[in-house]
Image (cartoon, rainbow, N blue to C red):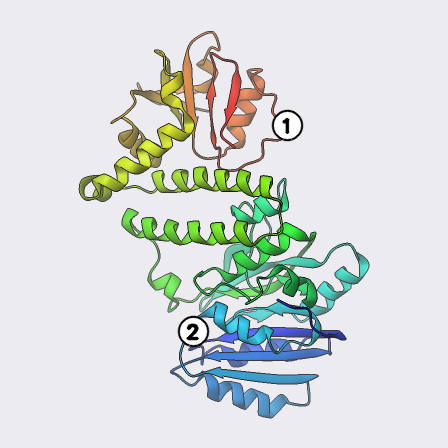
């Protein structure tokens, strides 16, 4: 999107709203209570069918003198979050922009601390803080934004190694507009925060404020709560959405061609791992072609078949999920058992990792990152890979060959 003529010192707060009549007045009140005064309030009602628009009007009538200005846009029909943010971005005039959900709350010093941070560190163009959570019963343990960026910040956001959420961020407006495609956010994606922050991370340095400045509401009546993922078939379509999200973020990012190709390869492997870890018995029974395709892709990408040569194949961990994965892989590869990171023997098919002898022939498959795996392999003298930081371990470890085979 094109740069705009901004008004120095003004923070544009974008609030998309859809059927949040019970919460939006409190959300807007938390903006009103900010100890930072120069705020442009931009509210987009996305075709609400309840009294959300009435609550917006009530708040605006009562507080029109509090803000630098208030702008309200109303969609006649529900167009989705991305379309709502696009509508808001066309109205923005502030030097800084932040966006957040209409059922959440800002801490009173949210904006002041973020603006102060960006002024202190001129090389940083976007800052993220942290969030706690609550529901109708009170505080919850869920915390957002406290998982730090690991390694390359674009990879870290793109593949979900660190947290992101609406309300955590504040960015220079023209920086945000520069990283977005010409027509704004793509409207065929669902996780607009993920997409926006990934694009920012591809081009600018993102800072981190280790303070809780946002209060995230967990609603029992929200779509994500009512329709939470429960079975493999639901996950299959969820991963389709995630694949599209990541593909667009890579495609629209400001990174070079070679790096994009590496990330497309990494995304391909992540997609396979995501899918194979969420296949269930119902899919095995009724979705044969899908299960077969994912299994074959996994074996092809990891090249396990090439290195078999009578080696014993073990999975790291013996959880129910790992046993389910073994059930899938056993149709193609003989799974000898499971490796446990502790000293204990946990059954006939579960051995202690400390009993693996590098002189013997093993292939160890790990689909999830655990510090214990790295610690064990370091203690065994097998690790010399300083750049390894991917929480999803896109690798297998061939002890006979005495090295990692890294699938990145």
Mark pair 2, 1: CA separation? 46 Å
Identify residue for label 1: 386
Mark 1 crowdedness (10 Å alpha carbons): few <14, some 14-19, many ≥20: few
Q: Residue furthest top?
A: 359
Q: Are marks 2 and 1 in contact (CB under 8 Å)?
A: no
Dot 2 falls on a residue whose secondary structure is: loop
Question: Which numbered tag is attached to residue 79?
Answer: 2
User: Is residue 345 visible to the viewer in this orientation of the structure?
Assistant: no
Query: Where 127 falls versus 4 (above or below)?
Result: above
Residue 369 screen position, x and y as percent: 49, 34
The residue at 43%/33% (across/down) is 367
Foreground mark, 2 or 1? Answer: 2
Q: Quadrant of residue 63?
A: bottom right
The residue at 41%/30% (across/down) is 301
Q: Earlier in the sequence, mark 2 or mark 1?
A: 2
Query: Is 69 or 112 nearer to us in this picture?
Result: 69
């Amino acid at each position: 999107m094109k740069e705009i003529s901004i008004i120095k010192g003004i923070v544009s707060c974008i609030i998309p709203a859809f059927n949040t009549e019970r919460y939006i007045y409190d959300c807007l009140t938390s903006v009103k209570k900010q100890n930072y005064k120069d705020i442009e309030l931009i509210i987009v009602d996305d075709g609400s069918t309840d009294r959300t628009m009435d609550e917006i009007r009530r708040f605006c009538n009562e507080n029109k003198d509090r803000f630098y200005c208030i702008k309200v846009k109303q969609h006649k029909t529900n167009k989705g979050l991305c379309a709502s943010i696009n509508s808001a971005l066309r109205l923005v005039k502030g030097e800084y922009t932040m966006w957040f959900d209409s059922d959440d709350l800002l801490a009173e010093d949210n904006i002041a601390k973020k603006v102060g941070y960006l002024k202190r560190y001129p090389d940083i163009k976007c800052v993220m803080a942290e969030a706690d959570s609550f529901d109708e019963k009170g505080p919850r343990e869920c915390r957002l934004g406290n998982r730090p960026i690991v390694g390359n910040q674009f990879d870290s956001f793109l593949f979900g190694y660190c947290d992101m959420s609406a309300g955590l961020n504040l960015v220079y407006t023209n920086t945000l507009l520069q990283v977005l495609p010409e027509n704004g956010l793509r409207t065929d994606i669902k996780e607009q925060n993920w997409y926006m922050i990934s694009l920012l991370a591809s081009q600018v340095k993102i800072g981190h404020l280790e303070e809780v400045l946002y209060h995230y509401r967990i609603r029992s009546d929200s779509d994500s709560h009512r329709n939470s993922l429960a079975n493999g078939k639901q996950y299959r379509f969820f991963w389709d959405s995630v694949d599209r999200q990541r593909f667009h973020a890579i495609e629209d990012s400001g990174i070079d061609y070679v790096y994009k190709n590496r990330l497309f390869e990494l995304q391909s492997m992540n997609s396979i791992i995501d899918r194979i870890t969420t296949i269930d018995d119902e899919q095995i029974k009724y979705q044969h072609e899908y299960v077969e395709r994912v299994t074959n892709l996994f074996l092809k990408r990891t090249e396990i078949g090439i290195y078999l040569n009578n080696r014993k194949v073990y999975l790291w961990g013996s959880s129910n999920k790992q046993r389910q994965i073994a059930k899938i892989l056993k149709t193609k590869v003989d799974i000898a058992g499971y490796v446990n990171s502790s000293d204990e023997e946990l059954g006939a098919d579960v051995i202690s990792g400390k009993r693996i002898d590098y002189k013997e022939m093993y292939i160890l498959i790990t689909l999830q990152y655990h510090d214990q795996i790295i610690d064990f392999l370091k203690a065994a003298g097998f690790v010399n890979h300083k750049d390894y930081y991917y929480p999803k371990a896109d690798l297998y470890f061939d002890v006979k060959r005495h090295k990692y085979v890294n699938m990145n």
